[in-house]
Image (spheres, grey):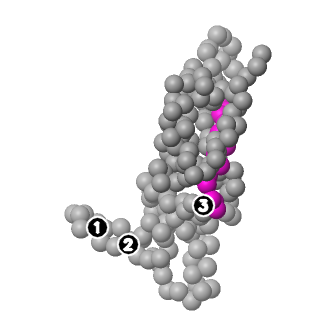
Amino acid sequence: MSWDALPTGRRGRQQTYSDAAIQMCLSMKVIFGMALRQTTGFVESLLQLVGLDWTVPDFSTLSRRQKTLAVNIPYRGSKGPLHLLIDSTEIKVEGEGEWHTRKHGGPKRRVWRKIHLGIDEETLEVRAVEITGSHIGDAPVLPDLLKQIPAHEQIGSVTADGAYDPGLCPFRAELILRINSETPFTAQMPRCHR
């Protein structure tokens, strides 16, 4: 890990701290639930305890850089083929209109969004995410979720509720093609019987 930023070759003032240094400081902030000023002092104390004479980013630098920081979260990976669990939930988007409706009453329409998640069954890591409006069903989103899994990665099974049933959506062939032929695939997506 490099604490100091490498030269970018662009005009203007260069960054003093690398993205890794900013990410480490922000990780300490989140882990210990501190404010940015507290984080700066905490990281400075840690560096002194280790015996490093490095400067620490001030709180305004942390605040500014956290907006554009691209964080790489490593994927541990599962042993063998991927067993993907898929489901969705709706969340209510609350804005000024929602507050106004609660305060004064009135027929304000609530806005809902749907979050579709694909989770690795073994590691419980989120592998695919799609956010749609509440008017879009689950089945049409399934191909978009599968496209987020790298093509070289072997999919052993896809488990979801009946709303994702590929028999109800025109992408059944795409789902079957994504399942590696060497691994037996058992459809674990039952149809809804009413």
Answer whether residue 150 is magenta in the image: no
Q: Residue 8 carries which label?
A: 1
Q: In which quarter of the image is the C terminus?
A: top right
- Please say if 41 is above or below 50: above
Neighbour class for label 1 at 10 Å: few (<14), some, many (≥20)?
few
The answer to whether the residue labelled 2 contacts the one labelled 1, judged by CB atoms less than 8 Å apart, is yes
Q: What residue type is labelled 1?
A: Thr
Q: Quadrant of residue 116?
A: top right
**88 inside magenta stretch:** yes
Instruction: Calculate the distance from the C-alpha at mark 3 to the C-alpha at mark 2.
Output: 30 Å
Sequence-first disc among 1 and 3:
1
Circle on res. 77:
3
**Crowdedness near tag 2: few (<14), some (14–19) or many (≥20) residues, C-alpha within 10 Å:** some
Q: Distance between the residues labelled 1 and 3?
A: 33 Å
Q: Name the residue under label 2.
A: 5
Element type where label 1 sits in the image: loop
Tell me residue 34's x, y (percent): 65, 61
